[in-house]
Amino acid sequence: QVRLVEFGGGSVQPGGSLRLSCEASGFKLGDYAMGWLRQVPGQERVGISCISSSDDSTYYADSVKGRFTSSRDKNMVYLQMNNLKPEDTAVYYCARFMLARCSGSYYHTQAYDSWGQGTQVTVAS
């Protein structure tokens, strides 16, 4: 059974950093690209990063490019978030991309077939 569990969310001041972790089980992580998505109440869930399985190539949304970095190791996927802004406040989800290699579709929820439960990130003074 595929299982994804995120942790590492919390509250931080603007300019601060957080590292989200996602523990994967029930499948071979190395066979799939993995994404991070986020959702603000009242808005749709959107992809912000994707990391491929074969070469660790990555995609980032313009809103987080240069501030967020995704990485992976063994059964874990990480999202390092630096210089956080209030507009980064959201529930963050780890998700399994349907293919081994990311593509531009990473932005859309339909590109993923398994999800974690989400972790709240709040950026406020």
Image (tube, grey):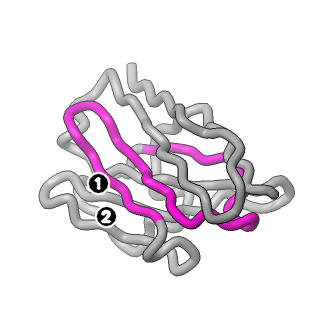
Q: Give the x, y percent position of residue 64.
A: 53, 71
Where is residue 104? Give x, y as percent. 40, 75
In this picture, residue 25 sits left or right of residue 56: right
Residue pictured at 20% horizontal, 52% vertical:
53
Q: Amino acid at mark 2?
A: Cys
Q: Left or right of 12: which side holds 54? A: left
From the viewer's perspective, is 101 left or right of 39? left
Q: Which residue is mark 1?
A: 99
| Marking on residue 110 | none
Measured as percent of width and height from the top left, residue 65 is found at 46, 75
Cα separation between marks 1 and 2: 7 Å
Q: Which mark is residue 102?
A: 2
Q: Which residues are magenta?
A: 68-95
Position of the N terminus, as image quadrant, is top left
Q: Indicate the position of residue 55 as horizontal and vertical percent values.
A: 14, 60
Count of numbered marks:
2
What secondary structure is found at the residue carrying circle 2? loop
Q: Residue at x 27, y 31 (%)?
A: 75
Which quadrant of the figure contains the C terminus? bottom right
In this rendering, position of residue 106 left or right of residue 28: right
Picture quadrant of residue 16: bottom right
